[in-house]
Image (tube, grey):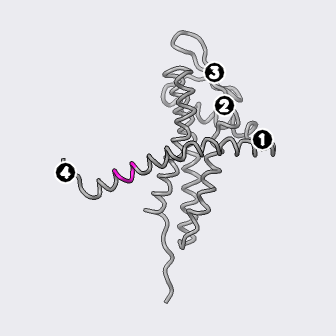
Amino acid sequence: MNYSKSSTKTFRNLFFVAVIILLILPFWITSQEFFTRIVMSMGWYRSIQAVIVPYELHLISLLLSLFGCSLQIGSTFIQWQTSQGGNEVIYLAWNCVGWQTFILLFITLFSGLSGNHTFLSKMITLGIGIMGTYLINCLRLMLIILVYIWTGRTFGTIFHDYFSNIFTLIWLSFYWWFSYKFVLEEKQKNN
């Protein structure tokens, strides 16, 4: 099999990103605990629990209904009937909605947007980052709930605990690659 130079470079870059993600994962998991304690000490979690959680539950339930999932929702939970006839419930707490991903996005924005790029391209990059992070968080929640529905609580919990973190790091890696490759434009030098 003959690989072109560009495909070899792509494979090498993908392998490099995978290695970096696996190296960063322990730090990322530890930093989530740190951010959680800060939010709890300031009381911000109450607003997240009261406003954002019910909104995201309704949105996720609506999106999952498009895939044929029959769900009942409350202000903090999603419930469905199992194939054995019982009910299964997942509670969505303030810590599940993806606010940590936004904090990590904003941390990366400080270095990612610090270059000599046009203001417009920086604003477009910021907009893509905020909207993309929101959509990725919704997709992540949908996938976690689908795994719970399809495989049960045990595998669903494992999927939730590890997949969420890896998914976030993959998203941010893709986001910055995409931004530097297609969005951010260097300022023109004046002579």
Q: Which residue is mark 4?
A: 2
- Name the amino acid, label 4: Asn
Q: Which mark is residue 40?
A: 1
Foreground: disc 1 or disc 2: 1
- The amino acid on which the numbered mark 2 sits, given as a three-letter code, is Leu
Who's the residue at 56% across and 66% down the image? 122
**Mark sitting earlier along the chain (4/3):** 4
Q: Earlier in the sequence, mark 4 or mark 1?
A: 4
Q: Earlier in the sequence, mark 1 or mark 2?
A: 1
What is the C-alpha distance between the residues marked 4 and 2?
49 Å
Q: Residue furthest left?
A: 1
Question: Alpha-carbon neighbours of circle 2 within 10 Å: few (<14), some, or many (≥20)?
Answer: some
Residue 91, quarter of the rendered image:
top right
* Disc ID at residue 89: 3
Residue under the image location 39 percent in, 50 percent down: 14
Q: Residue 92 has which mark?
A: 2
What separation in Å lies between label 3 and label 1 (alpha carbons)?
A: 25 Å
Label 1 CA crowd tier, 10 Å (few <14, some 14–19, many 20+):
few
Mark 4 to mark 1 CA distance (whole Å): 55 Å
Helix, strand, or loop for circle 4? Answer: loop
Dots 2 and 3: beta carbons under 8 Å? Answer: no
